[in-house]
Image (cartoon, grey):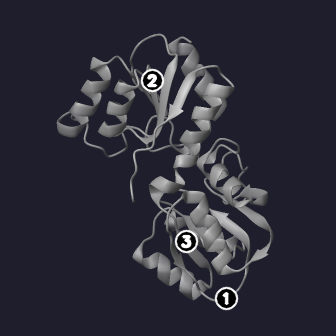
Amino acid sequence: MLRSEFELLLNQTLSPNRFKDYAPNGLQVEGKKEINRVVTGVTACQALIDAAIEHKADAIFVHHGYFWKNETPQIVGMKYRRISALIKHDINLYGYHLPLDAHPVLGNNAGLADAIGLLNRTGLQSGVAIEESIGVVGELKEPVSVSVFRAMVEKAVEREVLFECVGDRKIHRVALCTGGAQGYIEQAIDAGADVYITGEVSEQTIHIAREMGIHFIAAGHHATERFGVKSMAAFLSEECGLDAVFIDIDNPA
């Protein structure tokens, strides 16, 4: 597949034009014109680049790429080593941030929602279509205890989570937004959720949860954002005929 065809495929699938993002979505570093072998991962760190080089990849697809707003523009130090490795090995780098969070089938939020069995899903942002919402609200098939729900989430993200339990009320209505979205907890409250799941926690988040009576889970930024890049590897391989593989560079954060 030509590089131009590959980017068109990604843009048609993920619709980046719907989002006002913090970094450019699409091709960030240009490599070879023909793309057949793709590595996907959460972040374009040096370890993922090295793994892609070893895998002889033509392209890397990530959720966290480069050139973020307010990032220093100089290509020196760590940034130089990463970008120079991509250029030296002629590897294309594609980054898709909010579009990969929000995609209702392939996205991070969809993947976590699938893993815990959420039904009747709507967008977390009031009045925003689920395809454009940065977050999801849904319901479990039946209410479960906090201990059962914690086990469900930990199985989904394959790690222990921080669970601020504010009582023994069973959990039925769930709001979630993967990554560093602890600031959306009040939107989860407005949506009538019994629990809010995200990747990170701030000091004030715990006070909000306690005082507003909503269970809160911080399940890991990296752990909650593996879903989208895993799904993209499967999509590119099974639906598009490319040699695509997800490589996990573990991160406890």
* Residue kind at label 2, given as amino acid type: Ala
Lower sequence index among marks 1 and 3: 1
Q: Which is nearer the eye, 242 or 54?
A: 54
The image position of residue 210, as x and y in percent, is: 55, 86
Q: State how far apart marks 1 and 2 are (Cα).
A: 48 Å
Q: Which quarter of the rendered picture does the C terminus lie within?
A: bottom left
Can residue 253 be seen in the rendering of this structure? no
Q: Which residue is mark 3?
A: 217
Numbered-mark total: 3
Q: Quadrant of residue 76?
A: top left
Please give the name of the residue rendered at 58% of the width and 43% of the height, measured from the top-left corner: 228
Q: Pointer 3: residues within 10 angstroms few (<14), some, or many (20+)? A: many
Q: State how far apart marks 3 and 2 are (Cα).
A: 34 Å
Does the residue at mark 3 contact the one at mark 2 (Cβ under 8 Å)? no
Q: From what the image shows, is residue 137 above or below residue 244?
A: below
Q: Which residue is mark 1?
A: 168
Secondary structure found at label 3: strand
Please give the name of the residue rendered at 42% of the width and 72% of the height, measured from the top-left corner: 202
* Residue kind at label 1, given as amino acid type: Asp
Please give the name of the residue rendered at 30% of the width and 20% of the height, measured from the top-left corner: 87
The image position of residue 213, as x and y in percent, is: 62, 85
* Residue kind at label 3, given as amino acid type: Ile
Does the residue at mark 1 contact the one at mark 2 (Cβ under 8 Å)? no
